[in-house]
Image (tube, helix red, strand yellow):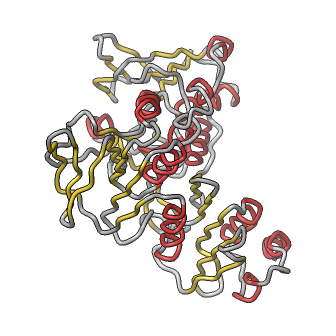
C-alpha cells in the first residue's frame, strides 16, 4: 500500500488530502502540521474571527469526523526535522520516522518580523494563527490606540476590524501608497480615502525606526515623529517555509520551484500553496501566490498528479479582501500595462477598473462587483480583444463579450 505524506496542515494540506481521496487513492494519507489546529482557512482570522462574528472552529475545512471517515491521519503539534529524499523518509521532532512513496510540501509561510529596537515588546502583535486573532480580539476594546505597521491586505483588514470595534487606528506604510504590491496608485488612493472616511489615520512613506517605552506610553517612532500606541500590529509580509526543500537540495527561488503540476526537481516530491513558486505562462515569469484560491487550486493540481491524474495549474492570479463595507477582488499581476479604464462611479456604487496592454485586459480590480469580475477573468484568460469604449459603456454586457470572444 502506498503512502502519501503531506507536510503542512493548513488549507493547502487539507485540500490536498481531500483531493487524493476524491481521486480514488486508497493508500495511506498522513498530514503532519506544527499548529494544534486541523486544516483551516486563514482569511477569516483578520475579519470575522477578529470581529467575534464566528468562532475559530468555523474556519476548519472539515468536521472532526471527516478524517476518520476518510482514513486520513492527522499528526498535529508535530514538526518535520529532516527529509531523506533518497530513502523516502521523514524524521519528526520526537525522533520517530515516517516512510513515504510521495511527499507533498504544503508548509506555507512564516510572518516577516520587525527587525528594530522594541520589536519584542509585549504590545507588538502579528496575525497569522488562530491564537493571534483571539489575542487581538481581547486587546481591541473601545478607545484602544492601535498602530498598524504595514498597509497591505492584512494590515488594512486588521485596521478595518479594529476600527469597527471602536479602536483609534493609525496605519503606517513605508511605501507611497496602500497595498502597493497588488494595486496601482489610483486604487491605493481609493482605499486611503475609504479608511480615512471611517476614522483611520493613514500615514504614507513612514519608515518605522524603533518602538520605545516612554513612561507609561509605548510609542512607534518614524523619521517624522512618534505615535502613541496601546497595541501594535505588524503586517509586513510573509516568507516561504522552504527550509525542508533547501535541505534536500530542491530548487528554491522565492519558494520551492514547481512545474504546473506541482512537481519539484526531486523525484516524488511535490509542493503547493504559499511555499510554492511556479512559472506562469500568462505573465512569463515565476510567481509565488499568497492567496486562498492558490492554496486550494494548486493543492488540487498537485494532489491529482500524485494520484496519477495529471492536472495543470497555470492561473490568472486572483485575490480578494474585505475592508469595512467594501469587497475588493483583483485578477492578474502584470508587470506592465498601457491604459486604465474605469467602469462605473466610485462615488456612487460598485465599479470596475480594467488595465489594458494594447487591446487586451491584463488585470482587473472590482469593488463590490463580483459579477463583473467573473466575466473579467474570462476576458483575461481568453485574451479577448476589447476597446476602452466597450468597457466604459454600462450597456456593454461583459458576460456576452467574454462568451463571444471565447468562441472566436
Question: Who's the residue at 30% across and 64% down the image?
Answer: 174
Residue 171 vertical position relative to residue 362 in the rendered view, above or below: above
Give percent across and percent down for residue 226.
22, 57
Question: Viewer-proximal residue, 382 or 162?
Answer: 162
Q: Is residue 98 visible?
A: yes
Give percent across and percent down for residue 109.
38, 41
Residue 92, quarter of picture: top left
In the image, is 151 to the left or to the right of 320?
Answer: left
User: Which quadrant of the figure contains the N terminus?
Assistant: top right
Question: Viewer-proximal residue, 400 or 269?
Answer: 400
Residue 215, quarter of picture: top left
Question: Viewer-proximal residue, 270 or 255?
Answer: 255
Give percent across and percent down for residue 188.
48, 70
Question: Who's the residue at 26% across and 35% down the image?
Answer: 247
Q: Is residue 103 visible?
A: no
Question: Viewer-proximal residue, 341 or 217?
Answer: 217
Residue 85, quarter of picture: top left
Residue 193 vertical position relative to residue 228 in the rendered view, above or below: below
Question: Who's the residue at 41% across and 61% down the image?
Answer: 201
Give percent across and percent down for residue 32.
44, 22
Residue 231 vertical position relative to residue 129 in the rendered view, above or below: below
In the image, is 108 to the left or to the right of 52?
Answer: left
User: Which quadrant of the figure contains the C terminus?
Assistant: bottom right
Amino acid at each position: 500500500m502506498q503512502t502519501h505524506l503531506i507536510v503542512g496542515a493548513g488549507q493547502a494540506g487539507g485540500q490536498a488530502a481531500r483531493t487524493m481521496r476524491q481521486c480514488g487513492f486508497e493508500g495511506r494519507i498522513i498530514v503532519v502540521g506544527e499548529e494544534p489546529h486541523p486544516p483551516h482557512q486563514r482569511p477569516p482570522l483578520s475579519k470575522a474571527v477578529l470581529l467575534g462574528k464566528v468562532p475559530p472552529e468555523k474556519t476548519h475545512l472539515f468536521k472532526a469526523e471527516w478524517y476518520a471517515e476518510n482514513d486520513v491521519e492527522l499528526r498535529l503539534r508535530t514538526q518535520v526535522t529532516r527529509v531523506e529524499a533518497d530513502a523516502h523518509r521523514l524524521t519528526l521532532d520526537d525522533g520517530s520516522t515516517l516512510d513515504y512513496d510521495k511527499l507533498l510540501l504544503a508548509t506555507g509561510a512564516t510572518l516577516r518580523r520587525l527587525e528594530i529596537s522594541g520589536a519584542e515588546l509585549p504590545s507588538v502583535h502579528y496575525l497569522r494563527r488562530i491564537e493571534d486573532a483571539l489575542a487581538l480580539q481581547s486587546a481591541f476594546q473601545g478607545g484602544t490606540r492601535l498602530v498598524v505597521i504595514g498597509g497591505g491586505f492584512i494590515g488594512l483588514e486588521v485596521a478595518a476590524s479594529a476600527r469597527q470595534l471602536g479602536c483609534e487606528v493609525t496605519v503606517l506604510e513605508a511605501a507611497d501608497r496602500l497595498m502597493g504590491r497588488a494595486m496601482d496608485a489610483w486604487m491605493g488612493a481609493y482605499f486611503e480615502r475609504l479608511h480615512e472616511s471611517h476614522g483611520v489615520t493613514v500615514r504614507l512613506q513612514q519608515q518605522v525606526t524603533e518602538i520605545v517605552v516612554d513612561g507609561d506610553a509605548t510609542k512607534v517612532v518614524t523619521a517624522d515623529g512618534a505615535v502613541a500606541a496601546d497595541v501594535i500590529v505588524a503586517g509586513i509580509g510573509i516568507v516561504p517555509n522552504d527550509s525542508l526543500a533547501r535541505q534536500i537540495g530542491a530548487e528554491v527561488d522565492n519558494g520551492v520551484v514547481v512545474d504546473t503540476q506541482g512537481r519539484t526537481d526531486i523525484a516524488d516530491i511535490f509542493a503547493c500553496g504559499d511555499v510554492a513558486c511556479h512559472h506562469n505562462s500568462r505573465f512569463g515569469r515565476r510567481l509565488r501566490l499568497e492567496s486562498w484560491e492558490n492554496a486550494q487550486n494548486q493543492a488540487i493540481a498537485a494532489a491529482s498528479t500524485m494520484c496519477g491524474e495529471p492536472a495543470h495549474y497555470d492561473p490568472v492570479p486572483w485575490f480578494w479582501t474585505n475592508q469595512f463595507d467594501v469587497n475588493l477582488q483583483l485578477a492578474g499581476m502584470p508587470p506592465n500595462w498601457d491604459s486604465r479604464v474605469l467602469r462605473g462611479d466610485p462615488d456612487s456604487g460598485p465599479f470596475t477598473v480594467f488595465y489594458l496592454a494594447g487591446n487586451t485586459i491584463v488585470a482587473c480590480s472590482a469593488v463590490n462587483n463580483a459579477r463583473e469580475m467573473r466575466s473579467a477573468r474570462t476576458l483575461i484568460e481568453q485574451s479577448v480583444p476589447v476597446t476602452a469604449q466597450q468597457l466604459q459603456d454600462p450597456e456593454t454586457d461583459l458576460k456576452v463579450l467574454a462568451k463571444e470572444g471565447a468562441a472566436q
